[in-house]
């Protein structure tokens, strides 16, 4: 279901205070949308709010922890009250751990923290917003940020890869549900490859006692004799976040299920080949 009009309608971007979220928020404002910037770091959301106001659009910043359903429900109340009609929701807030660490060395708290933001944050967004979206009679759209890690698994990053695979699976099931139920809400999954942002410092957002630097963490590189470290924002393939926003706007307008910021990883082709072989019993 295509969103035929963005201009003059409301959008909400979680993790809108930085990097990719900021880029998407600015691109939506560039289409004439009014934007709610939701971020656990209020000051950064306020900075982007001011940038968007500078473009002549309405914008508000709301401190929101997406891992908390009550926070996201409050965000929905504030957003609908501010702009009446929310046509676009971007569930983009996400976190990662550093150093990369083996699944057997990561704590259960490490896994719970990553899942609570990356997967539950997306679920909370759907629960709080979807029942009220498209109520103006015009189609609406939800974008959920996953990662290329789903298409090309990263050793030392199992919780992150699992959380983003959950985002993809949930998004595609919900996209099919909305269509089958006749709800005019499209769903897109964004798979960013490496993008130059502050993402690697996510653990600053954890409680002091919970942070990696407060305890001994065995780095993944100790198993690879200092060898390959997964590709990150510092890799040669890294792109600037500014390029991502327009790709997302295009996918919303075209109701595309997927956005890839980088070429398709070879792993996807190999996976299809192995699945095909398995299906034919070879
Ligand atoms: N940068 C990359 O290379 C890359 C690659 C693949 C996927 N991604 C995904 O892109 C999304 C955006 O990441 P980014 O690279 O722009 O990083 P970033 O750190 O610059 O931006 C993430 C934003 O989310 C906010 N945030 C973190 N936890 C939150 C919470 N609990 N509630 C609300 N806000 C919270 C942060 O304050 C920050 O403003 C994430 O979902 C990330 O997993 C990034």
Image: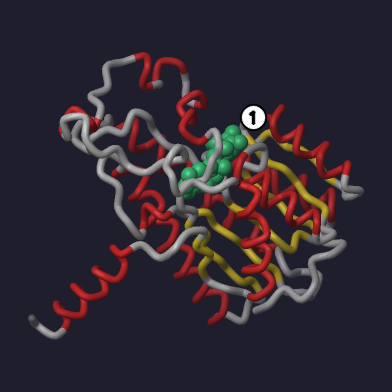
Q: Position of residue 90 (x, y in %)?
A: 63, 54
Q: Position of residue 217 (x, y in %)?
A: 27, 22
Residue 100 visible in this rendered orientation of the protein: yes
Q: Position of residue 125 (x, y in %)?
A: 59, 52
Residue beneath label 1, please? 41
Q: Which quarter of the picture shows residue 69? A: top right
| In the image, the residue with mark 1 has its CB under 8 Å from the nearest atom of ligand 1 | yes
Question: Looking at the picture, does residue 68 appear above or below residue 120?
Answer: above
Count of numbered circles on the image:
1
Which quadrant of the render holds ligand 1?
top right
Question: Looking at the picture, does residue 30 appear above or below residue 62?
Answer: below
Q: Residue at x 75, y 50 (%)?
A: 26
* Most distant residue in the bottom direction: 280
Q: Residue at x 51, y 68 (%)?
A: 258
> Which corner quadrant holds the C terminus?
bottom left
Circle 1 Cα neighbour tier, 10 Å, few/some/many (<14 / 14–19 / ≥20): some
Depth order, front residue of 176/92: 92
Label 1 sits on a secondary structure element that is loop
Question: Looking at the picture, does residue 66 appear above or below residue 180?
Answer: above
Depth order, front residue of 263/249: 263
**Color scheme of the displayed model:** secondary structure
Residue 66 visible in this rendered orientation of the protein: no
Q: Position of residue 254 (x, y in %)?
A: 65, 75
- Horizontal side of 137 relative to 268 (left or right) equals right
- Horizontal side of 4 relative to 262 (left or right) equals right
């Amino acid at each position: 279901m295509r969103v035929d009009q963005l201009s003059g309608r409301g959008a909400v971007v979680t993790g809108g205070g930085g990097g990719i979220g900021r880029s998407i928020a600015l691109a939506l404002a560039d289409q004439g949308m009014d934007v709610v910037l939701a971020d656990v770091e209020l000051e950064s959301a306020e900075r982007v709010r001011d940038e968007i106001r500078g473009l002549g659009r309405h914008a508000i910043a709301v401190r929101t922890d997406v891992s908390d359903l009550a926070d996201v429900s409050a965000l929905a109340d504030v957003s609908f009250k501010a702009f009446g009609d929310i046509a676009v929701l971007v569930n983009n807030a996400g976190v990662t751990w550093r150093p990369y660490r083996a699944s057997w060395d990561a704590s259960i708290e490490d896994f719970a923290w990553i899942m609570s933001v990356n997967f539950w944050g997306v679920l909370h967004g759907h629960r709080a917003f979807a029942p009220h979206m498209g109520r103006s009679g015009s189609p609406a759209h939800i974008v959920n940020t996953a990662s290329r890690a789903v298409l090309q698994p990263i050793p030392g990053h199992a919780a992150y890869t699992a959380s983003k695979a959950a985002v993809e699976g949930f998004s595609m099931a919900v996209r099919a549900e909305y269509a089958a139920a006749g709800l005019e809400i499209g769903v897109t999954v964004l798979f960013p490859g490496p993008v130059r942002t502050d993402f690697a410092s996510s653990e600053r957002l954890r409680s002091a006692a919970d942070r990696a630097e407060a305890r001994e963490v065995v780095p993944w590189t100790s198993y690879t004799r200092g060898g390959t470290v997964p590709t990150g924002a510092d890799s040669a393939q890294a792109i600037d976040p500014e390029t991502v926003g327009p790709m997302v706007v295009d996918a919303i307008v075209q109701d595309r299920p997927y956005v890839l910021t980088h070429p398709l990883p070879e792993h996807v082709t190999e996976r299809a080949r192995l699945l095909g072989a398995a299906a034919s019993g070879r």
